[in-house]
Image (spheres, rainbow, N blue to C red):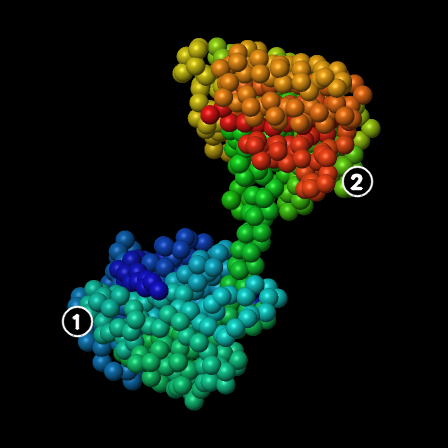
Amino acid sequence: MTEHLSPYEGRKAPVARPPAPADPRGALLRTPEPEVRGSAGVNAMPAQARTGEQDAGSEHAQSTAGAFGPGGHRPRPAPEGVPGQPHTGAGESRPATELAPAAPGGPPGGTERRTGLPRPPGPAAMRRDGDRLRFVGAATRRIARGIDLDEIVMGLCRATVPTFSDAILVYLRDPLPVGDERPVGPLLLRLRRTDRIPEDHDTDGGTLPALQVQSDLATAAELCEVVSESALDHVLRGVRPVFADSPTALGALPQLLGEGRSAPSGQRAILAPLRGRRRVIGAAVFLRRPDRHAFEADDLLVAAQLATHSALGIDKAVLYGREAYIADELQRTMLPETLPRATGVRLASRYLPAAETARVGGDWYDAIPLPGSRVALVVGDVMGHSMTSAAIMGQLRTTAQTLAGLDLPPQEVLHHLDEQAQRLGSDRMATCLYAVYDPVSHRITIANAGHPPPVLLHLGGRAEVLRVPPGAPIGVGGVDFEAVELDAPAGATLLLYTDGLVESRLRDVWTGIEQLRERLAATAQLTGPDHPPPLEALCDEVLDMLGPGDRDDDIALLAARFDGIAPSDVAYWFLEPEDATPSRARRLARSALERWGLTDLNDAVELLVSEVVTNAVRYATRPITLRLLRTDVLRCEVGDDVPQLPRLRQARATDEGGRGLYLVNKLARRWGATRLSTGKVVWFELNQT
């Protein structure tokens, strides 16, 4: 529980009141006021009504007890030349308390230090309906400006202290129900915020008497359980604000504040339930000092208006928070949590939403390991920034992952994505770029569906925009996609991105692409021609090219640094499906391990190669392939023309076979099987040490 002090500065010059609105109701409720010249004669009306468009801090600083005291009263300014009042020039300001006449019948409040005239104990009563209407209008506007829960509660506190009350306590339900959610468990109220006037200053710098409950604000009960059929329960269910001296409030306030804590007696405290759209979600307590005017009957209506607007705002803030949480979780689950560790390539990525208030969009990126130590690099952009766009993006990303697992060519992947988008709806449009990198051949195959072209940064610092056929966006239908195969030299960096990085209201897409190319080249020059820039730092440098107003869309960025696999670290053979093939495969594997200095792995590799090759020979009709790759691990791949994938099973004691994959699963670091368009590949990995 935190306590916040409200600014209480009375020496600020009154701000000129804007002209009265042409509202017939307001004209009927508002009484004529004498016209006063000079800054001192400006009508002293509620600061919130005068500064409805100012920020929260300045508006609250001008809501002083002189203009509108805790009693909610606005003093009538004295006309110029009234006897007993010193004349103030047009360039000077007079404290609001000087302009306030003494309340008739009120207790003496001392004398003004500067004028020697009797000082009233507080502002005059808010006797005109127009005053209350203006205050309620300004206060509700301030409350309505809040978006999240804390802003709304703070708006309620700052709008009422010190203008309407000297102190306020706001209790909210814990936990707050969301929408139609039915609360579970007892009704608990937790103290969310307190606000009060400082104890040691008034508008003229004098000392104010302490509020009876002021010392208890810092120790007020933070949690209160509302017992069924208790006095507090009756007040909350009654919904209407009540004075502290009402029969129900006499027992409700001690329950809410906690045992041993007191509140002002009589009509100097108002307990107002906060009711949302369907249920009570909290309570607000408005308090006034004993030396101030007590609340009036009409102040209950003001408290009811403040409580209603605050409760509805809190309800909307909770719903907004839940939707923002769902959107954020949806977007996060649609994007990969971590990028895979692919052989021969290093990866880095970035994602930036268009705005914090719209964190969902249709941009995505992905890196998918493929058979043969290859990796698929994908980046796409669905039109729109809504939950629907994010949902469509998730479906397209899942489809792309499934198609990549089938090891289809890039142009075929885009073709199937186009068909999937048409099944989702006639207006489901997206752009996508799909690339497959082979670290063994140092080649990359790219197909494009209406997406901005990738940029390749060479090791020497030269950056080029790759010439890739643009193609039509996904969802158009009836178009063919074309793939191109390009060199991917070791040390080069491929940058895939969405149009939010290069296109905005201030520049077209091709201007942005040229600026991106120049930025990459300039960054590469900082590290020299023989050392590429660090991948993570390169992504940050790319995002730094965005200036104010340059980002109108989401940004997805995927960077791939090509390390490749040297030819000396690859051993590749074609083997005929014969009975002698397993023994030949063992000999070839042993010779490769001896050449690499990995003789410690001879026994395990020979056993596993023999089991996998034997299974391939049993069913294959065409030559099988055997490939060994030496990177940070030793990887063995066996391919054949049979599409059925092997499954791990528990062999019985009487079975003659079925134990090959069991041995692979026990001895290998990792293993798997992938279906290809021409068959399948079974692979396993072993640690080199």
- Looking at the image, the residue that sits furthest to the right is 478
Where residue 372 sits: x, y (%)? 64, 22
Query: Residue 116: which disc?
Result: 1
Res. 451 visible in picture? no
Q: Residue at x 53, y 55 (%)?
A: 321
Where residue 608 sits: x, y (%)? 62, 27
Where residue 399 sits: x, y (%)? 71, 36
- Looking at the image, the residue that sits furthest to the bottom is 247
Of badges 1 and 2, nearer the viewer stands 2
673 in relation to 456, above or below: below
Q: Residue at x 60, y 17 (%)?
A: 589
How far apart are labels 1 and 2 at the CA level? Answer: 85 Å
User: What number of labels is visible?
Assistant: 2
Mark 1, other Cα within 10 Å: few <14 / some 14–19 / many ≥20 = few
The picture quadrant where one finds residue 407 is top right
277 in relation to 575, above or below: below
- Looking at the image, the residue that sits furthest to the front is 654
Residue 27 falls left or right of residue 254: right
Q: Secondary structure at mark 1?
A: loop
What type is the residue that disc 1 sits on?
Gly
Where residue 668 sits: x, y (%)? 57, 31
259 in relation to 641, above or below: below
The picture quadrant where one finds residue 419 is top right
Mark 2, other Cα within 10 Å: few <14 / some 14–19 / many ≥20 = few
Query: Residue 291: which disc?
Result: none
Residue receiving disc 2: 423
Res. 109 visible in picture? yes
Depth order, front residue of 134/414? 414
The picture quadrant where one finds residue 640 is top right
Residue 672 falls left or right of residue 229: right
What type is the residue that disc 2 sits on?
Arg
Rendered-image quadrant of the N terminus: bottom left
